[in-house]
Amino acid sequence: MLFHVHMDVNLPPDLDPAQRDDMVTREKAYCQELQRAGKWPHIWRIVGEYANYSVFDVDTNDELHQILSGLPLFPYMDITVTPLAVHPSDLRG
């Protein structure tokens, strides 16, 4: 199952810099682990924002929820999830 996910990160300005650096480091490692596993095949930065558009390839809605809620930055994110389906004009479909 494919999902388009928009993640907008809103870190508090008064967040301890060491805590911020630790969360960002853990976030990157988690993201790259999921990419290697094929669960997070696409991630794009949105220019000028601390946000991204991503595509997830998971087996269930629950798996996606587990992945997203496991993100170290999850408590500071606004997330929008859109399920995707194959388009009839897609040459690969």
Image (cartoon, rainbow, N blue to C red):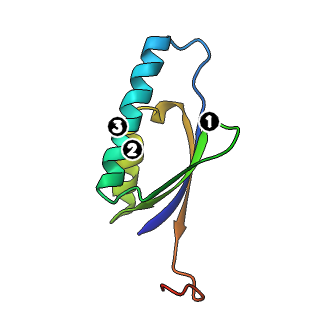
Separation of residues labelled 3 and 1 (CA atoms) = 18 Å
Asked if residue 57 is positioned above or below residue 25 in the image, the reply reads below
> Which residue shows up at 40% across the image and 51% down it?
65
Q: Quadrant of residue 57?
A: bottom left
Amino acid type, callout 3: Ala
Of 51 and 92, which appears nearest the observer? 92
Q: Earlier in the sequence, mark 1 or mark 2?
A: 2
Separation of residues labelled 3 and 2 (CA atoms) = 6 Å
Residue 10 placement (x, y as % from top left): 60, 30
Residue 42 placement (x, y as % from top left): 48, 57
Residue indicated by mark 1: 50
Residue indicated by mark 3: 29
**Count of labels shown?**
3
Q: Earlier in the sequence, mark 3 or mark 1?
A: 3
Asked if residue 72 is positioned above or below residue 90 in the image, the reply reads above
Amino acid type, callout 2: Cys
In contact (CB < 8 Å): disc 3 and disc 2: yes
Q: Say which element carries label 2.
A: helix
Identify the disc placed on residue 27. Answer: none
Amino acid type, callout 1: Tyr
Asked if residue 91 is positioned above or below residue 50 in the image, the reply reads below
Identify the disc placed on residue 31. Answer: 2
> Which residue shows up at 35% across the image and 56% down it?
62
